[in-house]
Amino acid sequence: MLVVANFKMNGNKNFFLKLNETYEKLKIKGTNVVLCPPFVYLSNLNIKNKNVCLGAQDISIVGNNKSTGQIGAYMLKEFNVKYCIIGHSERRAIGETGEMIAKKVKSACENKIIPIICVGEATKQDKSSAVKNQVKSALKYLQPGSKIIFAYEPVWAIGSGQVPTIKHINNKIKTIKAEANALGFSPKILYGGSVNDNNFLQLKTAEIDGFLVGGLSLDTNKFCKLIMGV
């Protein structure tokens, strides 16, 4: 299983420094953990645990230095970043387009950073092909066979306390896999959206390869409980 912590715009220097000791002592078996802090705290995480690595929350759309305020993939590599969340619904909501996401995915892969591509429908009643289109769009610039991960995060479930049924999740996982496979990719697929220490065991029964966790990651004790339980 793969468990990814998206700390979003939370935490401070002391919070992330304390995580080093916590995660170094954690005896994890059968699970890999990715910690995605805000960019400014990447250097504060230096965890010596083979099951824990670093991820970023975003990446620049361009690969050169002519982009004020952006963080390039080659910069993230200097901090030993292995993964990068791309296309989160919160970024789509402020104008990030499918074309921008596709270019970010390409940049990540070119720099041997594994993209965690977020896809998901806007409302619980949405029966459209939104997820299918998001998958297809994100992969448009990649060579078949590139190593990628998808995170199915229904927008209506993120931070709402609402969780899809296992049947609903499995149907969306099937859609993602079918579209990706048709384009020559075999991605792992995570689930995200109101995952907590009380529901993760039930969610684990879905056909997923792990979780993308938001709010719960800020409670280190509860998040570690999830890690040790999956």
Image (tube, rainbow, N blue to C red):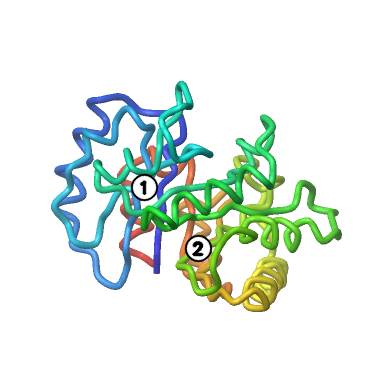
Q: Quadrant of the N terminus?
A: bottom left
**Number of callouts in the render?**
2
As shown in the figure, which amino acid type bears the numbered disc 2?
Ile
Residue at point 67%, 30% (across, down): 94
Residue 163 falls in image quadrant: bottom right
Residue at point 19%, 56% (across, down): 26
Disc 2 from disc 1: Cα separation: 13 Å
| Residue 134 at x, y percent in the picture | 70, 56
| Residue 159 at x, y percent in the picture | 60, 40
In the shown orientation, is residue 214 left or right of residue 166?
Answer: left
State the residue in front, 107 or 199: 107
Q: Quadrant of the C terminus?
A: bottom left
State the residue in front, 170 or 112: 112
Q: Which residue is mark 2?
A: 149
Q: Which mark is residue 219?
A: none
Residue at point 86%, 60% (across, down): 127
Please determine whether, in this image, residue 201 is positioned above or below residue 66. Answer: below
Secondary structure under badge 2? strand
As shown in the figure, which amino acid type bears the numbered disc 1?
Gly
Q: Which residue is mark 1?
A: 55
State the residue in front, 79 or 221: 79
Secondary structure under badge 1? strand
Please determine whether, in this image, residue 116 is positioned above or below residue 208. Answer: above
Residue 144 falls in image quadrant: bottom right
Nearer-N-terminus badge (2/1) = 1
Other residues around mark 2 within 10 Å, as few (<14) / some (14–19) / many (≥20): many
Please determine whether, in this image, residue 43 is positioned above or below residue 14. Answer: below
Residue at point 63%, 56% (across, down): 138
In the shown orientation, is residue 167 left or right of residue 215?
Answer: right
| Residue 169 at x, y percent in the picture | 66, 66
In the shown orientation, is residue 219 left or right of residue 132?
Answer: left
